[in-house]
Image (tube, rainbow, N blue to C red):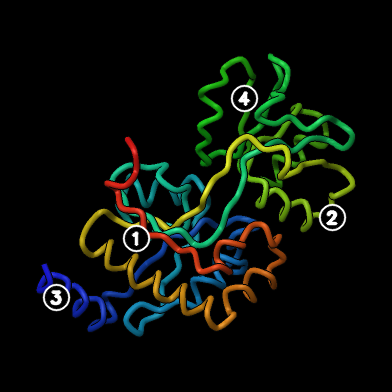
Amino acid sequence: MGRVLFLIMLTLGGSAKAAVEVIVLDMPGFAANNKGWMADLLHSISVFGQPLRLNLQPVVRATSSFYQAGKGDVYAADVLCLQPHVHYLTVGLRDYEGFVVRKGKPIPDRLALPPKGSTILVVRGFDHDFVPKHLEYHWKEASSIPQALTMLRVGRVDYLYTYLELAEDAISQQHLASEFDYSIKHTVADIVPALVFRSTPRGLLLAQQMRKQLLKLTATGIYAKIMASNGLPSWHFRDGVSGIFKIVKESDCKP
């Protein structure tokens, strides 16, 4: 096994052809137009002396490229243990799934769900366990969080169900704080975003090397600076500031 890992390291480090390609979600609050906290974080990481090669794609295309078409070495990012047959590396973030509502409307949560028959919007390409478990609602899809916010604002749907950090960022960018309500005190699910790797020796090695890089960024203060400079709420990256970056193998995820 040691010889196999040595040969993998030699291959990764010895040729430009072995540059690690990361498929990244191209969307506000993430890495839109090659800018944002995820892009900044990945631009600060190298593997065996080589920078990562970022390939930004819309949500649906990104998930299809990595999981179905087998393109890319790393996927940034998915929810921990959401997909089978891959390894994960947590990036020190903790997010929540919850509801965004029009200003003045009560915010549902796991203890007080929306009335049956409500029309709820989700963003296409995001997998939420909550959705298939609640067929008593009318579910609609938007192509992005900005489009979803527009549909919610004009009353085409009753609620938006999404990741609250991404929603918070999009609302801030569009200066719409006076239009919507949301709260991390009223959530449905606690989720952990993570980088995704192929379940191969090479994939595991990449996860180990990138974890070392993340720990170095935390020790030098760069990690916190990247997150804060992109306006992320402190609750979102508290784990990373504490150096909590875990490798979760495929075998560690419960079926």
Left or right of residue 145: residue 85: left
Q: Which residue bears the numbered disc 1?
A: 72
Q: Amino acid at mark 1?
A: Gly
User: Residue at the location (69% across, 24% down)?
Assistant: 113
Q: Are marks 3 and 4 in contact (CB under 8 Å)?
A: no
For label 2, the SS is loop
The label shown at residue 139 is: 4
Question: In the image, residue 72 lies at what x, y percent?
Answer: 34, 60
Classify mark 4: residues with Cα within 10 Å, few (<14), some (14-19) or many (20+). some
Tell me the CA gap for discs 2 and 3. Answer: 51 Å
Question: In the image, residue 12 lies at what x, y percent?
Answer: 25, 76
Tell me the CA gap for discs 2 and 1. Answer: 35 Å
Quadrant of the rendered image containing residue 98: top right
Quadrant of the rendered image containing residue 238: bottom right
Sequence-earlier tag: 4 or 2: 4
Q: Amino acid at mark 4?
A: Trp
Q: Which residue bears the numbered disc 2?
A: 175
Left or right of residue 29: residue 255: left
For label 3, the SS is helix
Classify mark 1: residues with Cα within 10 Å, few (<14), some (14-19) or many (20+). many
Q: Amino acid at mark 2?
A: His
For label 1, the SS is loop
The label shown at residue 59 is: none
For label 4, the SS is strand
Q: Which residue bears the numbered disc 3?
A: 7
Classify mark 3: residues with Cα within 10 Å, few (<14), some (14-19) or many (20+). few
Residue sitting farthest toward the front:
242
Which quadrant does the N terminus fall into? bottom left
